[in-house]
Amino acid sequence: MDFTLSKEQQDIVKAARKFAHGEFPDRALEFDREEKFDLKIWKKACDLGFVGVFIEEKYDGAGYGFFEHCLINEEFWAVEPGMAAQVLSTTFGAELVQLFGTETQKLD
């Protein structure tokens, strides 16, 4: 069995790593101490396709799978777990809707 990442998966890893290193370290301590978060970082992650990557394209997702979602999680958490949780926790529950939801639920 071949566990080598595809070129596209390698690109996702590189992009997630670059984003996390560029956005997380300088702000993490501030956010932790002040118990706040800048939504601009989350919006940027959304715009780059990191949030909801497993959601099908017809529902405005990137159309990848849960494995690609895990690759992004791994890169974000390696840099700064608190920031990773803030950015990626917004899709909590979306996995269940994606897998078991009705068409109406998926469109919402």
Image (cartoon, grey):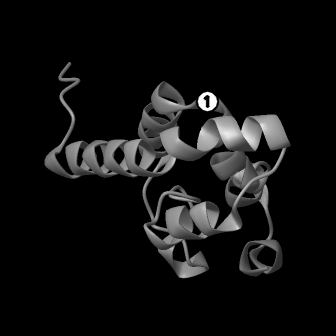
Please state the horizontal and vertical placement of residue 35, each as a whole percent of the image: 85, 43
Nearest the viewer among 42 and 69 is 42
Please state the horizontal and vertical placement of residue 52, each as a whole percent of the image: 58, 59
Q: Tally the numbered discs.
A: 1
| Disc 1 target residue | 81
Please state the horizontal and vertical placement of residue 68, each as a whole percent of the image: 42, 45
Residue 11 in sight here:
yes
Q: Is residue 107 left or right of residue 48?
A: right
Nearest the viewer among 38 and 81 is 38
Compared with 36, 104 (above or below) is below
Compared with 69, 79 (above or below) is above
What residue is at 47 percent from the left and 31 percent from the top? Answer: 79
What residue is at 32 percent from the left and 47 percent from the top? Answer: 18
Please state the horizontal and vertical placement of residue 108, each as a whole percent of the image: 79, 79
Q: Secondary structure at mark 1?
A: helix
Q: Is residue 29 left or right of residue 90?
A: left
